[in-house]
Amino acid sequence: MSNRILLIEDNEQNRYLATFLLERHGYRVESAADGASGVQAAESSVPDLILLDIQLPLMDGHAVARALRAIPVLDATPIIAVTSYAMVGDREKSLAAGCDGYIEKPIDPDTFVSTIEQIVTTVRAGRNAS
Ligand code: MN
């Protein structure tokens, strides 16, 4: 997969950990700490992948996903929701809002990047088939 990732995450520790893991695997990470600046960043930089925290202040991740999906230049950009395991219904709502997959929090350093890569591969395969 190509290598520019936009990370929308309000928690500084999660942002740090996710960025560290992704950069170690050769990805370039741009991050935003809230939904509105995330949408703005996505529209201007058109990343190859968006990682979207669902629990965000002001504009939650579902609203952010819908806003991102309304931007035509981002049609080809997969969005992966980062959801809390404890939040029942988050995952289904994320998919309904336009996310292509989800990954669970807490971030597992051993599987985080490979899980993301797997989801992206699956999404791309599905798009090529249709
Ligand atoms: Mn959060």
Image (cartoon, rainbow, N blue to C red):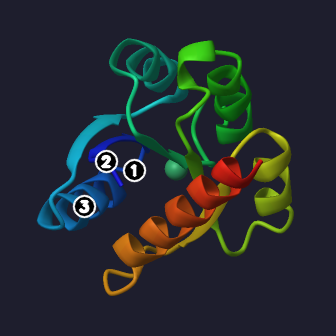
Q: Classify mark 3 as within 8 Å of ligand 1 or not, answering yes or no.
A: no
**Drawn side of residue 120 relative to residue 1, left or right:** right
**Ligand 1 within 8 Å of the CB at mark 1:** yes
Circle 2 residues within 10 Å: few <14, some 14–19, many ≥20: few
Q: Distance between the residues labelled 1 and 2?
A: 25 Å
Query: Type of residue at label 1?
Result: Asn
Q: Quadrant of residue 117?
A: bottom left
Residue highlighted by disc 3? 22
Amino acid type for the residue under numbered disc 3: Leu
- Amino acid type at mark 2: Ser
SS type, badge 3: helix
Q: Earlier in the sequence, mark 2 or mark 3?
A: 2
Helix, strand, or loop for circle 2? loop
Residue 71 x, y percent position in the rendering: 62, 15
Give residue 108's quadrant in the image: bottom left
The circle on residue 2 is: 2
Front residue of 64/86: it is 64
Residue 35 falls left or right of residue 47: right
Residue nearest the observer in this picture, 105 or 21: 21
**Mark seen at residue 11:** 1
Q: Which of 53 and 24 is in front in this view?
A: 24
Q: Is residue 112 above or below residue 90?
A: below
Q: Is residue 10 left or right of residue 39?
A: left
Q: Residue at x 67, y 34 (%)?
A: 65
Circle 3 Cα neighbour tier, 10 Å, few/some/many (<14 / 14–19 / ≥20)? many
Q: Where is residue 113 in the image (x, y as percent from the top left)?
A: 35, 71
For the point 61% across and 65% down, the residue is 122
The numbered mark, 1 or 3, whose residue comes first in the sequence reads: 1
